[in-house]
Amino acid sequence: MRRLLWACLAVLLLCCVWVAGVARQIKAQSTIDEARPADVIIVLGAAEYRGRPSPVLEARLNHALFLYLKGLAPLILTTGGAGGDPVYTESEVGRAYLSRRGVPSESILVEIEGESTAHSTTAAAEMMRRRGLRSCIVVSDGYHIFRVKKMLEFRGLEVYGSPRPSLPKGGWPEYWLYVKQALAFTAWRMGVNA
């Protein structure tokens, strides 16, 4: 019984070390802007409110628009499903927002089915594959970039992260975001889509 307890404690300790290590990698990636010329800019979805982007989604869209206007990619791909809204999807709200700011409709691709990061990245990668697109700039919050990059790289794409500008939260609230992403990344690596 005592050996089993020590074995369980050892496994728990190893898991904590793993998660802490991944969280450090996520934190390091969260402030690196790798934006460079690519085939498409992918904007990860976030909440929308009855057809209007939440402040987080709006900030992501504005950053993607900035990169697009710099000429870093000819296309923007918005992601995100309905999230409980019976009328709008995050990606369609993103498309409308970008269109109102002058991005031609033919330059905006929309992935409307995404219910999770894993689902959205899988669908986005498939859309890119069908169009012969091989490289992308991923726009999201800094804490999200590491996991999204790994998911898209797993699909054989060349991926550059470009976190939206934001003020650091600092302290435990910020570190908790990295830990949650590390747990989600670990679950994905184990075959659980989060």
Image: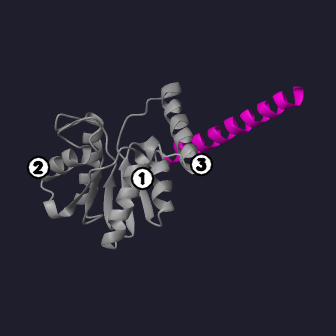
User: Magenta stretch: residue 13 in it?
Assistant: yes
Residue 17: quarter of image: top right
Residue displayed at 75% across by 37% down: 11
Say if 156 sits above or below 165 in the image. below
Label placed on residue 33: 1
Left or right? Give the position of 24 relative to 74.
right
Label placed on residue 100: 2
> Secondary structure under badge 3?
loop
Q: Label 2 amino acid? A: Arg
Range drawn in magenta: 1-29
- Residue 70 seen in this snapshot: no
Answer yes or no: do the residues labelled 3 and 2 have beta carbons within 8 Å?
no
Q: Label 1 amino acid? A: Asp
If you read the primary sequence from the N terminus, does the residue marked by circle 1 or circle 3 appear first? 1
Q: Distance between the Cα atoms at labels 1 and 3?
A: 28 Å
* Residue 151, image x, y percentages: 48, 55
Q: Which is nearer the eye, 5 or 63?
A: 5
User: Magenta stretch: residue 96 in it?
Assistant: no
